[in-house]
Amino acid sequence: MLGFVRIGCLLAGLFFLSQRALAEPEVRHTVSFPKDREQIILVRSEFPVSLPMTELFMPNWTPGAYRIKDYAANVNRISAAFGDGTELSLQKISKDHWQVNTPQAGTLVVEYEVYTPTVKPTTSWASRSFSLINGASVFLYSPQTKYMPQRLKIISDATRGELFSAMRAAPDGDGYRVNNYDELVDNPVAVARAPSYRFTHNAQDYVLLNVGENEFWDGQLAAEDVEKIVAETQSFWGTNPLNRPYWFLNFIVEAKGGLEHDHSTVIMTGRRQMRNRDDYIEWLGVVAHEFFHVWNVRNMRPVELAQYDYQHEQYTSQLWLAEGLTSYYDNLLLSRAGLITPSEYMELLADDIYRLETTPGRLLQPVSEASLDAWIRHYQPNSNLLNSSISYYTKGAVIGFVIDTYLRKTSKGRHDLDEVMRKMYDLYSSQPYDDQAFENLLVDVGGVEAGLLLRSLLTTTTDPDIDGALDWYGLELDRGAIAPTLEPEEEPVSAPSDLGVLWDEDEPGLVVNAVFDGSGGAAAGLIPGDEILAIGDERLTKETLGSLMTSFSPGEETALLISRRGKIISLDIKMDIAIPDHFEILLKSDFNKRDIKRLQNLLGQDPRKQH
Ligand SMILES: [Zn+2]
């Protein structure tokens, strides 16, 4: 848009203008893959230049994943030339920034290769079996041409498969063409031989692409379930911001996670994810989560994320809303879509409460602060994270449940959180919201007290009144074994004991991943990385852990033999009470018809229903 106006009108008459309009300046990116190397993307970008110096930047992060990833670390063999082939000197001046002398107007051609280190939704991957192009990790931009149309051509032979993307095809049929660099970044491309499943809901087209579909994955069934999520989410919001087909780019490649975009999402999952009910529910939850983001975070954004700055952190205190409330609704919409039973929903809610209440860091850091720390803590956790911070996903989801229940309870069912979310969207899909917006709307719907409750949940470390919220539905939480009080003359009570640590799941042995502050393990001097070899005079392994922990009583003293950086050390430890491995939501003894009705309104199905 900018380029069109600047070039045409001052210099020439109408005829010339119309000729230029046909050749509107654009940045042209061409991607190809070398035949002799895996994990490499070759990029050739052509920038129209008009200034004596052209600045080029490689993004440091991608929207939706709040962590500096330094994509420039994977950029190699970069060179610059004029369109006529004359070499130009290109100088790197900081980790993510290059300058090229471009003494005359014309086309700057920059060529480089991008190494793709890992298979993740937030970066790119190039291999013969499948490739993923995530724009922020691949394409340079220059501030002068960032708002120009960008054309993308991907040269790939048939053995690598077809191209799949929500990106708009160029009107002339030559590759893809988008309005600006933001759109280039927002439309990942899959290159693969993969089946796709199409469906239409309320005149909106959708495609589920299953890269890596195998004998453990029923593509048709998955597509039918995705359609149910789509239908439920569309009806939740009641408005459709999509203007072209939406793509679920699902990579069944033994990786995890999802990343939202305006008209697509990249999801990664395990090869046998569909074989186990809990794992499949987890995948459905990711689908629901990413699709909910079309509204909450893509089209309705905190003011700090209104314009993306690809080079720097963009701090917002609102990730409890953008991510946390999305996490509240992802499971809830699965229930309302009939994809999980009420009891499966209750297990997921109990899991969120469990994760919240077994994280000591919730007592140190309010969730609004945790949101600011996304950049330094949550996307790159250190082993003290559980003692120092709380996940805005987990606490945000629990806050969603508590606030939703508060609204339903105080209004006798006339108001709920759904209404606040829709009002937020009405107001803030056309303009970004500030950190008071949600609270103000909540006060409009639920009164001053609702606003005060929210503020307290966001800015203090006071635990949400979960029991009170559950009670309104006739439910109660079983938190498992309660610590017995040992009188000196009493025999030790048989209760599960523990060391007060978390284990590193990736290690074959019993290696400590984190130590709970205040635990027996902390007092004994255990630190992350310690491998526990024996307890008392018995060898401790993953296989014997369960039985040996129950053979000790909480409070009992014993010795641990550990290996720390190759040195064998003995430590004295006082055994802890084990944290239960899960919480359970139960019906109260006086559970009645009124509770059934309340739960039915929340869950979209009869709570007594069994599938
Ligand atoms: Zn999310």
Image: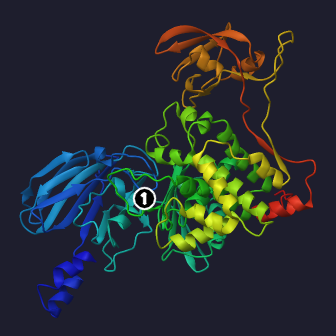
Amino acid at pointer 1: Glu
* Side of 363 where 173 appears, left or right: left
Q: Residue at x 66, y 35 (%)?
A: 358
Answer above or below: position of 336 versus 537. below
SS for callout 1: helix
Answer above or below: position of 563 versus 106. above
* Side of 40 where 205 appears, left or right: right
Quarter holding the C terminus?
A: bottom right
Residue 4, how many percent across, how many down?
23, 80
Quarter holding the N terminus?
A: bottom left
Residue 84, how many percent across, how many down?
8, 66
Q: Residue at x 46, y 39 (%)?
A: 380
> Which one is in front, 42 or 510?
510
Residue 369, how many percent across, how many down?
51, 45
Q: Residue at x 57, y 34 (%)?
A: 386
Rendering colour mode: rainbow
Would residue 224 be visible to someone looking at this image? no
- Give the residue furthest to the bottom: 14
Q: What residue is disc 1 on?
A: 304
Quadrant in which ligand 1 is drawn: bottom right
Would residue 259 be visible to someone looking at this image? yes
Q: Write down the quadrant of residue 161 in the picture.
A: bottom left
Q: Label 1: few (<14), some or many (≥20) within 10 Å?
A: some
Residue 219, how many percent across, how many down?
61, 60
> Which one is in front, 201 or 199?
201
